[in-house]
Amino acid sequence: MSTARAARGLLLIGAFAALVSRAGAQDPRASLRLDAPSKAALAAVIDSARAQGLPTEPLTEKIYEGLGKGADGPRIVAAVRMLVQDMTNAQRALGTVASSDEIKAAASAVHAGVPAVELGKMKKRSGLRRSLTLPFTVVADMVSRGVPVGTAVDAVRSLVGAGAKDKDINEFQRNVKEDIQQGASPAAAAETRAKTAGGTKPDGELDR
């Protein structure tokens, strides 16, 4: 192992120690859950993610989330590895023009069951005109609420294609959530709101 790599490993483990200390301030048991092998495994995972050009902040957030929920070291390592895989799939689909925030949001959508290739198509069509962080986040949220994947992708893609602003997409998300809470089927709520949001209409079904 090179001196530089060893130094990076020590820095990462030091960062985990600070992370655990912060969690321990809220729950003293947290400092006992991240064992030495798990710390080493997490350091290696984050080092590898950084080498791939993936954002590492979501990984440390996932570690802290796991500690806060009382998960043990092996479960946290598994969750972080899964997140790296989701971000890797998202990065491959979105390409080099994607920002760290877009990769993070796309990873959430991929984890929810959205094919990365569909997110890549959406990014390609939008080009550099706008960030798709919010649209990807909304797709993930809708799928988590029971909206079929194809319907969720079609709805958000139609809004993006029609030039909807972030405020319009936020309003669309809020309206779909309220419709579902009031008893509408998730699919019907998304389809209906997509047709009326900002005066836009869906631009076609999910490519298969």
Image: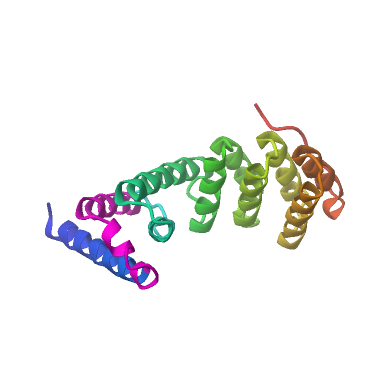
Residue found at x 36% / y 44%: 78
Residue found at x 77% / y 43%: 190
Q: Is residue 167 left or right of residue 141?
A: right
Q: Image quadrant of residue 187?
A: top right
Considering the whole magenta stretch, tell me its main secondary structure.
helix
Q: Is residue 130 left or right of residue 82?
A: right
Q: Can you say whether 110 is above or below 17 in the image?
A: above
Q: Image quadrant of residue 16?
A: bottom left
In this picture the colour scheme is rainbow
Percent across and percent down for residue 39 are 25, 55
Q: Residue furthest top?
A: 208
Q: Residue furthest bottom?
A: 25
Percent across and percent down for residue 165 are 74, 59
Q: Is residue 143 left or right of residue 56?
A: right
Q: Nearer the viewer, residue 4 or 153?
A: 153
Percent across and percent down for residue 157 are 71, 44
Q: Nearer the viewer, residue 207 or 172?
A: 172
Residue 97 appearing in the image? no
Residue found at x 40% / y 55%: 66
Which quarter of the figure is the C terminus placed in?
A: top right
Q: Is residue 12 left or right of residue 192?
A: left
- The range drawn in magenta is 23-51
Q: Nearer the viewer, residue 112 or 57?
A: 112
Can residue 70 be found in the magenta stretch?
no
Percent across and percent down for residue 137 are 61, 52
Residue 75 appearing in the image? yes
Q: Can you say whether 4 is above or below 155 in the image?
A: below
